[in-house]
Image (cartoon, grey):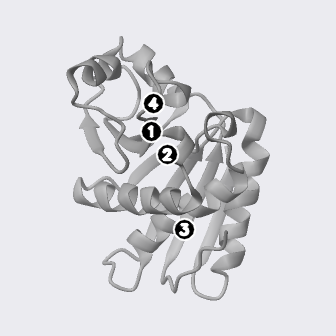
Amino acid sequence: MHFTQNYAGMITITVSAESIDSLIQDGLVIGYFSDERPPRGLCGFVDWRLNGLISRHVARGTVTGTFMEKVLITPHKRIPSSKLLIIGLGESSNLTYERLHSAGQGIAETLSKIQCSDAAFDIPSPHRCGLNVSEMTTAMISGFAEALLGKNSKTDSHAVSVLGDDSYRDEITLGVNQFKVNVKHTMKVFIHEA
């Protein structure tokens, strides 16, 4: 899958497999699949750290995981980020690269609305959805950059951290590098590894 857009500006992308305890970002964005109960992956870990807060929201129906659902939660210092955004990814078997591109756009638009310019988001595990990690990464970053740095954007520079398990960190880095190649003539991309 090849996502290309005429971006303008600069984006700094940090690839990290570190614990959320090491996060310095103001916002943390986690994906939630509607067919995963209890939450798994990073969402499950954050739920555990928040003493089941996400699970309680799921039980009440305020978090459903419906595709593109966005729920903002204040984590009350149980994790370093002051804003927690849960984005619905729909059913894991229905996840596509196009949906991840849309999710990236939705993440950027929501972060802009809540005035959060420093955030981290995770890439779903390939075991949960059966997609290629590097292509998932390229799709999400492309959507994110398109929404934040497109020709109608007021922002010309942004930073984001991409989180993933250490077992597929290299594939995430490959996806970020593919994004950089895709936009090399239209924007500056700086990549860091943490």
* Residue at the disc numbered 2: 121
Q: Position of residue 35 (x, y in %)?
A: 45, 30
> Which residue corresponds to the image point at 60% horizontal and 77% vertical from the top-left?
188
Is residue 26 at least partly visible in the picture?
A: no
Q: Position of residue 81 (x, y in %)?
A: 38, 35
In whole angstroms, how far apart are the C-alphas of marks 1 and 3? 17 Å
Q: Earlier in the sequence, mark 3 or mark 4?
A: 4
Image quadrant assignment for residue 49: top left
Question: Mark 1 — residue?
Answer: 30
Q: Nearer the viewer, residue 93 or 118?
A: 93
Q: Position of residue 112 (x, y in %)?
A: 29, 61
**What percent of the width, then of the height, locates residue 121?**
49, 45
| Circle 2: residue type | Phe
- Neighbours of disc 3 within 10 Å: few (<14), some (14-19), many (20+): many
Mark 2 in CB contact with mark 3 (< 8 angstroms):
no
Q: Which residue type does callout 1 highlight? A: Ile
